[in-house]
Image: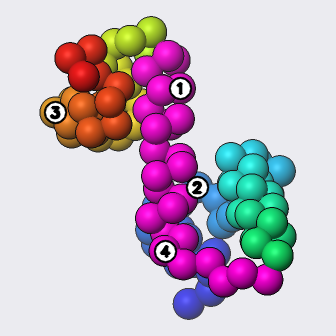
Amino acid sequence: MTAKKKSRARGDSSVRLSTRELPLRNHAERALSDYFTSLNGHKPAHLYDLVLREVEEPLFRVVLDYAEGNQSEAAKVLGINRGTLRKKLKELGLSEGA
């Protein structure tokens, strides 16, 4: 089965987005390339955890700002349950009670 047929079988409306249509992906790729360059020969470790720690807090801050502090709306934007959002906010020290 060709990529186009597989794409249609999954219900995708397009085969693939061009790189220009993915600005967040471009920023992430550039940041990671810069990170590897800055290592000066040192070997990275636990990169997955590092990326999540670095991205998660600003993600929640920006989405909450976008949703004007409305946690239900922020949870919808993030595609997560409101309870999960509240738990993550507490873990990150971003909740009002923290």
What secondary structure is marked by label 2? loop
Whole-Å distance between the Cαs marked 3 and 1? Answer: 18 Å
Which residue type does callout 3 highlight? Gly
Disc ID at residue 62: 1
Position of 31 relative to 55 (above/below): below
Single out the residue that lies furthest toward the bottom. Answer: 1
Image height of 3 relative to 94, above or below: below
Q: Earlier in the sequence, mark 4 or mark 3?
A: 4
Q: Which residue is mark 2?
A: 13
Q: CA distance from mark 2 to mark 3?
A: 32 Å
Kind of residue at disc 2: Ser
Label 4: few (<14), some (14–19) or many (≥20) C-alpha neighbours in 10 Å? few
Marks 1 and 2, how far apart at CA: 29 Å
| Residue at the spot of label 3 | 83
Residues at marks 1 and 4, CA–CA distance in whole angstroms: 25 Å
Report helix, strand or loop for mark 1.
helix
Residue sitting at 51 percent across and 61 percent down? 50
Q: Disc 1 or disc 2, which is closer to the eye?
A: 1
Whichever of callouts 4 and 2 sits on the residue coming sooner in the sequence is 2
Image coordinates of residue 54 in percent, x first then y, are 54, 49
Left or right: 92, with 64 as reference point: left
Type of amino acid under label 1: Val
Taking the spot 56% from the left edge, 90% from the top edge, the residue there is: 1
Residue 16, by quadrant, is bottom right
